[in-house]
Image: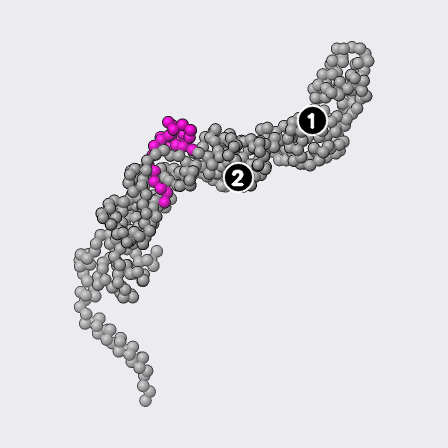
Amino acid sequence: MIRPPLTLLAAAAGLVIGAAVVFLTPSRVLFPPAAAVEAQREPGVRWACAMMDFIAETRGDGICPVCGMKLQRIAAGAYGAEQRRRMQLETDEVTSGPAIVTVRAYGAARWDDRRAQVVVPRIAGRIVKRHAGALHDASEVKAGDPLYDLSSPELLSAQAELVAAIASGDESLVAAVSQRFARWNLAAAAQRIRDGGSPSDVVTIVSPADGIVMAPEVMGEAAALPAVGTEVMANDPLVRIVDPTAYMVVVHVPESQARLLRLGQAADLASDDGGALRDVAATIAWLAPALSLETRTREVHIHLIDRERRLFAGSLVSARIRAALGPDLQPADPDQPTTWGTFTLVAKSAVLSTGIRHVAWRLASSDGGAQTFELATLALGPRLEDESGNDRYVVRAGLEPGQRVATQGAFLIDSQAQLVGSPSLLFPDGAVAPAPAHVH
């Protein structure tokens, strides 16, 4: 006869005993009446197991039915000194003052085309020589340095006419022909003929100023420097001469701060390779009337003169622009305190937000070592960042100056409020019933 293993016998015995216990236990013990459970509830209090995924509305026997550990009392908003230490809970005072903000933006430097000079011939011809200043893009030249030699049959013909006019002795005719040379900016060629020189079809185009030679722009884009043999018409652009100390910095300001700017605001600039440009006076010269749909930023142009030539065209530049808000939350003059408004300000770290709803946990009372926090629903204005990098919000409603709010640890307070069913960030009216942690 085969005897069953002892483990099977033990399991069967356990099932029989368990069934007997359940059968003999009164139903009021296993399933207490709803009224009895309700009587044991404390508003805003839940009991949770620190080990298992279990939360109860009442303490019951104080033991987790899953693992047997002692249940912990959870009451949102009320914390003793030891609890605050474990949560690393910190508070900050709500203040009142002007809304001063440092707008930080980033972009790149480029030549200031406002100070560029375009070199054009006043007479048609063909390029027969490129001088040193026109051999390479970005060559540096001085005023009067030769750039191109141009062969022009029209110039040769005009010189022949001037020779004939001089031979005729008719001064009025000589003056009329000489005016043509003046229109071409070639008065020196006419004077050479008067001094007895021989006619020549070659004219030298020189730089009108000190600067850097750049290729001309065609349809808004830089073209190549004209080569030998190129036929050019009168007033066709040959090169641009840019001022190597004059730059336009193009930065992009985030949409959230786009309205804080105004023309003429000063900007503190720094570059990755040149460091802070403390001696450079830079102001906003142009503001884009629309935001970029791709980057959600506003383009800003800042003009400057860098006489030390620490920047390159293309240098990455950061800008810090000091701004202020008036009483109507519109940009004010940052240099005129009389135009500033006074606002309630709260640390950004105290604000919990869904993007639509904003709350903070306000210190309601402090009794000895215990502190109690309450939920404050906020209406916010702009976010501000000062020169030290501290973020604050303008509070339009929900808090008053002098009150204190939780900063570090605010999220833990809100999480416990959700566990116990109290009003919180996600549940303005509180949860109707606590959901187990594994239910989402």
Where is 34 relative to 336, above or below?
below
How far across and how far down the image is residue 215, in percent?
66, 34
Count of residue discs: 2
Identified at 28% across, 54% down, the residue is 82
Where is 151 relative to 102, above or below?
above
Split into 4 quadrants, where in the image is the C terminus?
bottom left
Q: Nearer the viewer, residue 100 or 1?
A: 100
Q: Amino acid at mark 1?
A: Gly
How far across and how far down the image is residue 22, in percent?
22, 71
Q: Are the residues at dot 2 and dot 1 in contact (C-beta closer than 8 Å)?
A: no
Answer few, some or many: residues within 10 Å of disc 2's Cα (few below 14, many 20 plus, some between 14 and 19). Answer: few
Magenta-drawn segment: 323-349
Q: Quadrant of residue 339?
A: top left
Identify the residue under disc 1.
Answer: 144
Q: Secondary structure at mark 2?
A: strand
Q: Taking the image as drawn, is residue 410 in sight?
A: no
Q: Quadrant of residue 236?
A: top right
How far across and how far down the image is residue 25, in percent?
19, 70
Identified at 73% across, 20% down, the residue is 188
Please tell me which of labels 2 and 1 falls first in the chain. 1
Q: Amino acid at mark 2?
A: Gly
Q: Which mark is residue 275?
A: 2
Horizontal side of residue 188 vs 77, given as left or right:
right
Identified at 78% across, 16% down, the residue is 194
Q: Which mark is residue 307?
A: none
